[in-house]
Each structure stands twice: as C-alpha cells, then as structure tokens.
Image (cartoon, grey):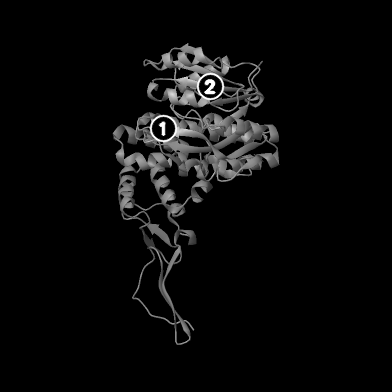
Amino acid sequence: MAPRLTVVVPLYNVEEYLGACLTSLAEQTMPDLEVVLVDDGSTDNGPALAQEFTERDPRFRLFRQENAGLGAARNAGVREAHPGAEFLTFVDSDDVVPPGAYARMLAELDRSGSDFATGNVLRLRANGDLEQSPMFRKPMEKARPATHVTRDWILLGDRIACNKVFRRTFWDEHAFAFPTGVLYEDIAVVLPAHFLARSVDVVEEPVYHWRDRDGSITTRRAVPRGIRDRATAVTTVSRFLAERSSKESKEGAADAAEAKRRYDAHALSGDLWLFIEALPDGDAEFHEAFLEHAGAFASTVEPGVFASLPLHLRVKWQLIRERRLPELLALLADEKKDRDTFHVRGLLRPRAHHPAVRDPLPLAATALTAADLPVHAHLTEAVWRDGLLRLTGYAHVRNAPGGAPRLGWLR
C-alpha cells in the first residue's frame, strides 16, 4: 500500500540533532507516511543513527550518495520516493516537526483541494525554548484556506520549503527541482510554486521547529558566497515573473508585471537588506561581492520600485547602484546611533540630506513625502481644573528644522 506522504530528509554532519529530528517524524500521528533519508556523504555517526531507525521502523529508508549539497540531496530523495505517494514534504535533519503537524496539513488539503499547504514556524533556541519566528509572524497570523499570493502578498515572505506539504501531482506537473551547489536553494522553488499554484492553504498553527544554530548556513551573512547565492536566488524568481509577464494576455501580463514589481521591492527591502546590514562586519572581498551581485540585481529593477521604498532604503540602494561603498558604510555607522536622523533641505521641494553622504544624490532617492516626516505627538498630562480640561503635551516633526518654542492655548 502506498504511503500518503513522503518526507525527504537529507543528512550531513548533524549527528547531535538527528535523533530529535527522526524521533519527531516517527511520532507523527499519521501512520501512512514514508521517511526517505539521504546520507549526503556525512563523515560523522549520523548515518549509523539513521540506519538504526530503518531497522526498527519500516517507514524509514536510507540512501547514500557522495556529498553534493542540500539541493542535490533533496532532489535525490524525491527520485527515491514511492511513486504512489500523494503528498511530499522536506525536513532539514537538525530541525523538529511538532506532533500532529502533517495530519493537520493533510486534513486542510483534503478539504480544500489546494496544491500545497504552508504553516507557521517556531525557532528552536539552543536552550530548548520555542519562539515565534519573526519571518512567519505576519504571513501565518491567521488561517486562510485556498488563498493565493496574488491575493495575499504577505506570502512573498514565505520562502522556505520545510513548512510545506506539496501535492505530488502539482510538484511533478511543474517539474520542480532544487538548484544544486548553492545556498538559499528554497527560494527558487518555493516562490515560483506560490505563483504557479491554483490555491494554497495557510495553517496558523506551528508545523515546523527551525533550529537556531550559530554555525548554520542561513546565519552566516558577511561571506561572498552568501550574497552571491542570495542575489542569484532572487534574480531567478524575478526573471521567472518577468517571463510570465511576457507570455500572458494583456490583462494577465499586467498582473504578472505587478507581481514582479512587488517581488522586487520585497527582495530589496528583505532578502538583500540582510546583507546590507552585514556590510560593516564584512571584509573587502565581501564588499566587492556585494556591490557586484546586489548591483546586478538592482540593474534589473524598474525605477518605480525604488521610488516605492522607504527613504532610508532609497538612499542606500542609490549608493549601491553608484558603487559608493565608503559613504554607504559611513551612513550605516551613523544610523547605528540614530537611524532616522537626516537634515531637511529645500523649501518648495524638500529633500533629505545625510551628513555621511558627501556628493548629492538624485532627487528621486532623497525627495521627502509626508510618510518620511511623520508627526510625533505625546500627551503628558490631562486634568480637570475649574471646570476646564487642561491637556499638556508636545508634538514635533522629526528632522524638520526647529524654531524657538511657543506656548499656545486651545479653546
């Protein structure tokens, strides 16, 4: 009898955490699953531990290959999956799947008929504590059956594979495969899957515990390979959306073009922002790699997308596009003390001026709108006195030129 669900688990030198991972799979409340373990050339005792699970639980199978990386190991696991399995999912071997997660997701898919389900993620800290992953707080804050990224743009932030259960027919229909030999291999599969799906189920409950390890590949930022592979991943998705736009009808092309603009803005403010933050910690090699790869992606983005970004990002991306690294580093150092500090120049067309930026930037990057100059108001006291309500407080527009304080009365 074919299992309903195939769970693909690549193994590579995570012996310390593997037992907890495999135990969490063995204890899932749905019995009709198979666990395909792919030893990706481990040099520790992980494969021996995996073999023990296969000997005591027939749902576990172990395959071995020379080290080829996470993407290749996942692809190998898909090839070894039972051909009759209805659903497919992936687990990293240092993580944990909470009890009942797969039963819950399959129940949603049975009700909706969606192409895949995606669920909430908690970070598993070194001390064993579980905390809401900030990445998934907004995308998963409420259940949404049979939704779609084009109706629910916040799902652009849902970009990992392991919190999902895919319908196998959907996976095969689009011949999904993880890129090999790179980091961040999830992005180039998961984001296209969101757009290609007819509908997606969002599960509010946590379905995955993502272990927080200092040495894991996702926590190393200031390395050339990291920015190269992240920029490659977001470029792949952006190009995919551009190609969809060129193939669609007039109405469909407009929708696809809007999807590309939204995704590009998300990449500039999210995926690649992580590496802007890492610039002060990087060496010259990382700095050059960042300018090359982030700049190459930026060159494919429409000007209107940059204009839609908040001021602090518009300025930084303009410096990146002009390869003005010393000024960018100085600006980041200033913002570490006070992120929102800048001078306002111009009366008719106010613009921001940052002391760290020596030469002028285009007005498109520095022009100020009401959103860049919010009013901050604070009520310090409210008392009744002699039949009158006396309110005391203050208000100011941050960064706007100041003058002598004035006292006023409202009647």
Res 166 quadrant in image: top right
Residue found 57% across the figure and 16% down from its top: 79
Position in image of residue 66 (x %, y %): 43, 12
The answer to whether 92 is drawn above or below residue 306 in the figure is above
The answer to whether 378 is drawn above or below residue 411 in the figure is above
Res 251 quadrant in image: top right
Q: For the residue marked with disc 2, what is the amino acid?
A: Val
Q: Which residue is mark 1?
A: 218
User: Front-most of 380 and 351?
Assistant: 380
Position in image of residue 212 (x %, y %): 40, 34
Q: Secondary structure at mark 2?
A: strand
Horizontally, residue 277 falls left or right of residue 271, namely left
CB-based contact (under 8 Å), mark 2 and mark 1: no
How many C-alpha atoms fall within 10 Å of the one at disc 1: few (<14), some, or many (≥20)? Answer: few
Position in image of residue 355 (x %, y %): 31, 55
Pair 2/1: label in front: 2
Q: Earlier in the sequence, mark 2 or mark 1?
A: 2
Q: Which residue is mark 2?
A: 8
Q: For the residue marked with disc 1, what is the amino acid?
A: Thr
Q: Is residue 46 visible?
A: yes
- Count the marks: 2
Residue found 46% across the figure and 22% down from its top: 70
Label 2 vs label 1: CA separation?
20 Å
User: Front-most of 381 and 184?
Assistant: 381
Quadrant where the image shows the N terminus? top right
Residue occupying the far bottom of the picture: 386
Horizontally, residue 249 falls left or right of residue 336, namely right
Q: Secondary structure at mark 1?
A: helix
Q: Is residue 261 visible?
A: no
Tell me the number on the disc at residue 399.
none
